[in-house]
Image (cartoon, grey):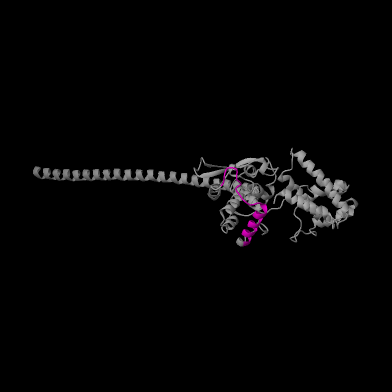
Amino acid sequence: MSWKTRFENARGTLNSDEKICETNRRLFEEFFDFEEYKLKRQNRLTNLDESSYKTLYGYVIRFRNVNKWFGNKPWKNLTKPDIKRVYDDLEDGVIKNVKGLPFGDLPGYYNKIFKSKPFRLAGKSELAKDVIEFSTGTGDREVRYVTEDTFRKMVSVVSNPLHLLLFWLAWDVGENVDALLKLTKRDFIRQSNKQTQEGEYLVNFPKAKIKRSRRSRTEPTLYPETVRYADMVLAERNTDDKLFDFEYRQALKVMHAVVKKSGATCLPNGDRVSWKDLRSGMACHLLKSGWMREEVDARLGHTPQSKALNAYINYLAIDRERPKKRLFDSSLEEIQNKFEEAQRREKLTTERLQRQQLETDSLKVQIGQVLELLGEQQELARGLTKIQKQIQKRAI
């Protein structure tokens, strides 16, 4: 089901829901008319695209939640205590989501509903800004990701080549599943890597197929498994055919089945794995493998100097590991220098001993020669003495 269909169905249901007061329903309709026009003009669109409808669908969900938090009270009649009560309950974790957990996207609600156009239409945005004065804007980004071991555990229970390709692309190139499901054969170029001479694909992400906040780009695949399954699937596709013959809802079912069968969970809290967690998992894996944050940002399609990775870099202590590594490297270099100096001293000592040994051997030879010469002289002297005695006898 397309995002356009989802939004139109959800909007129709919201507008006809008699459990929601009529005043708020009229406000919601006024906002949707405004937001549709805004999205067209901001993005220079003649007609709204799927990304726009996905944005609008998100507002339907938020409107239902906020309306519930305020007990279906007309937003135009909200008071400062009303807003403060909801704000405090959200911050203190009193208000839970459908999983029984505190809401994680509080900045989204504050910035898109309370302090923005919906509450302005109700005349309450300034009041909300006064109440929510301590909100940090973007808030602390939630950290959740999968490791490479967990990812490989997941794909080990998958047998369908089409599903395997989707998993490997989500992990390898790190784009979200919505964009991956839009890819066609035309978006893939096979080549040999100049350094490794191994096969790889260049995957093109045109602007029309990715989130507006992402940059269009072409990324090379990193894993041979991605190439293997891409070869299998692309061989059966024509140039303009989509790679995947299913949409987002079916992809969710596949993910849920794989998670259930493999028992895979996210770090650090053991949450159930989602498609988005493969993207963050890839980013963490590259960071821990030595990639610079600018390189990972570029692969993710972030704008230069994006702060989206900060939460993961801080959690993984990447920036704190590098000074530690430099300290370790410095200590190691000092030890290495001392070792090399000891080796040099040992070499000099050995050479000196060798020279002394040579000199000793030479002296021994010379002493031997002297002793031999002395022996010869003594023998000669004894011979002369004997001759002298014989001469004396004859003289007598």
Residue 195 placement, left or right of 302: left
Residue at the spot 18% in from the left edge and 46% down from the top edge: 382
The picture places residue 44, in percent across and down from the top left corner, at: 74, 37
- Residue 369 or residue 45, whichever sits in front: 45
Figure label count: 0
- Residue 337 or residue 135, whichever sits in front: 135
The picture places residue 32, in percent across and down from the top left corner, at: 81, 46
The image shows residue 65, relative to residue 391, as above or below, that is below
Task: Report the quarter where the C terminus lies.
Answer: top left
- 115 within the magenta span: no
Q: Can residue 384 be seen in this view?
A: yes
- 246 within the magenta span: yes
Residue 343 placement, left or right of 317: left
The image shows residue 82, relative to residue 212, as above or below, that is below
- Residue 57 or residue 282, whichever sits in front: 57
The picture places residue 278, in percent across and down from the top left corner, at: 63, 52
- Residue 367 or residue 303, whichever sits in front: 303
Residue at the spot 54% in from the left edge and 44% down from the top edge: 200
The picture places residue 280, in percent across and down from the top left corner, at: 65, 50
The magenta segment is: 237-260
Residue at the spot 38% in from the left edge and 43% down from the top edge: 355
Q: Can residue 285 be seen in this view?
A: no
